[in-house]
């Protein structure tokens, strides 16, 4: 499936005032039976949507080229803090094609209750497509709770909220189809990324809106769908988003109206090794050993099928066929563990233990470099 089949979204804002969002949304009793936490009851989807809906906003950004207006980028977002912090997609508020944004980091924000504000883009990370916008209000603002995506399983119910095709306050529901869809599976180049795949109906304008579990917690940020198919939608897992937000906080949040386009320079720093990696399990290992009896006797680990020439990993002595079993002094069984250990360690030596053919053990030292932000 080619990357061109995937679309990133924006849509026109059409405010539709709602009731008082400063109060907690009522939870209907339904037929009187109170479902357990995480269980699907008669009113579960409606209650979850009611908890998060007031915090979902519409974002509109004028775009232009050398002072000439060329249109508007429009999408959705979610207020995640009472101070007016809004979580959204970078492509909603930043021009990916390199054209100059006439707004100088300013965004028009419309709440579900009809209130409108001028927001400021504080940070935008093009690699993950995540951005933070800030609004200031003298009156209370509704905000949604961040959940965790690590506990999601295929088949779990989820809800997508946003403003598709100018239809404000739209809610759709579906299930999680896959919890770790790789960017390479979607034909997307660059550094490795993982997405939540759902069958929720999302369209142009849903980008940046929340993906919510039935407990009313944000578990993802809706980002794209397959343009030529139904029921294939993707979201950035909220655990990854939380990590990105922490990186934003480390780099400092500034008012981009005073530093035009400076939010792009405050990118998330990512280490790069130059390895293609594959998680191993017992069955894959058995198959590999059937094909090559010299393959190391491991139950789990991370296989290195390819090493980029001239990369930090190449200089450290990694070879295709290596199985990483220890990283910076810790046993590892997955790529996620390696990414978590590296964090933002650029230029710092990391000790790695790999197993090779005939159970040869090699101890390597690799020094990560900063990844090219264009990757």
Image: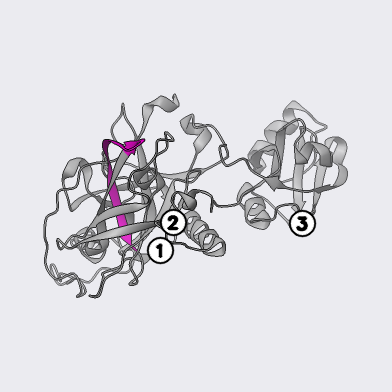
x, y (%) of residue 146?
Answer: 39, 64
Label 1, label 3: how far apart the Cα atoms are: 29 Å
Q: Is residue 156 above or below residue 193?
A: below
Q: What residue is pinned by disc 3?
A: 328
Secondary element at image label 1: loop
Residue 230 is at least partly visible in this image: yes
Q: Which mark is residue 238?
A: 2
Magenta stretch encompasses residue 78: yes
Q: What residue is pinned by disc 1?
A: 147
Identify which residue is drawn at 43% across, 58% down: 258
Q: In the current view of this chain or complex, which residue is farthest to the front?
A: 67
Label 2, label 3: how far apart the Cα atoms are: 26 Å
Q: Earlier in the sequence, mark 1 or mark 2?
A: 1
Q: Depth check: 176 or 257 in front?
A: 257
Label 1, label 2: how far apart the Cα atoms are: 7 Å
Q: Depth check: 323 or 294 in front?
A: 323
- Left or right, residue 25 beside residue 199: left
Which span is picked out in magenta? 64-79
Contact between labelled residues 3 and 1, with CB atoms less than 8 Å apart? no
Contact between labelled residues 2 and 1, with CB atoms less than 8 Å apart? yes
Q: Depth check: 281 or 184 in front?
A: 184
- Left or right, residue 306 beside residue 42: right
Q: Earlier in the sequence, mark 2 or mark 3?
A: 2
Q: Depth check: 109 or 348 in front?
A: 109
Magenta stretch encompasses residue 238: no
Secondary element at image label 2: helix
Identify which residue is drawn at 81% across, 43% down: 355
Colouring of the image:
one colour
The local crowd at label 1, few if under 14, some if 14 to 19, many if 20 or more residues have their Cα within 10 Å, is some
- Left or right, residue 72 beside residue 112: right
x, y (%) of residue 57?
Answer: 25, 57
């Amino acid at each position: 499936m080619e990357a061109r089949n995937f679309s990133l979204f924006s849509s026109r804002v059409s405010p539709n005032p709602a009731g008082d969002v400063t109060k907690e949304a009522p939870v209907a009793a339904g037929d009187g039976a109170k479902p357990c936490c995480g269980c699907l009851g008669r009113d579960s989807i409606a209650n979850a949507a009611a908890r998060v809906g007031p915090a979902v906003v519409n974002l509109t950004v004028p775009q232009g080229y050398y002072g000439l207006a060329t249109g508007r980028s429009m999408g959705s977002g979610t207020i995640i803090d009472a101070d007016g912090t809004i979580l959204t997609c970078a492509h909603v508020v930043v021009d990916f094609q390199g054209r100059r944004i006439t707004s100088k980091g300013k965004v028009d924000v419309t709440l579900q209750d009809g209130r409108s504000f001028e927001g400021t883009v504080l940070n935008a990370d093009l690699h993950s497509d995540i951005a933070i916008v800030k609004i200031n209000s003298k009156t209370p603002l509704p905000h949604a709770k961040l959940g965790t995506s690590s506990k999601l399983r295929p088949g779990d119910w989820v809800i997508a909220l946003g403003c598709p095709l100018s239809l404000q306050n739209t809610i759709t529901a579906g299930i999680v189809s896959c919890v770790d869809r790789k960017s390479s599976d979607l034909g997307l180049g660059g550094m490795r990324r993982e997405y939540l795949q759902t069958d929720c109906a999302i369209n142009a304008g849903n980008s940046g809106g929340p993906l919510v579990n039935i407990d009313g917690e944000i578990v993802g940020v809706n980002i794209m769908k397959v343009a030529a198919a139904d029921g294939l939608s993707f979201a950035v897992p909220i655990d990854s988003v939380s990590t990105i937000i922490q990186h934003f906080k480390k780099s400092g949040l500034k008012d981009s109206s005073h530093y035009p386009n400076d939010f792009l320079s405050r990118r998330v720093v990512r280490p790069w090794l130059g390895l293609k990696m594959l998680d191993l399990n017992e069955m894959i290992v058995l198959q590999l050993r059937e094909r090559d009896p010299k393959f190391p006797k491991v139950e789990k680990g991370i296989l290195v099928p390819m090493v980029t020439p001239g990369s930090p990993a190449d200089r450290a002595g990694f070879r295709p066929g290596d199985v990483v079993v220890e990283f910076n002094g810790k046993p590892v069984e997955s790529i996620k563990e390696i990414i978590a250990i590296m964090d933002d360690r650029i230029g710092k030596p990391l000790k790695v233990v790999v197993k090779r053919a005939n159970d040869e053990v090699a101890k390597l030292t690799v020094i990560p470099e900063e990844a090219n932000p264009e990757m």
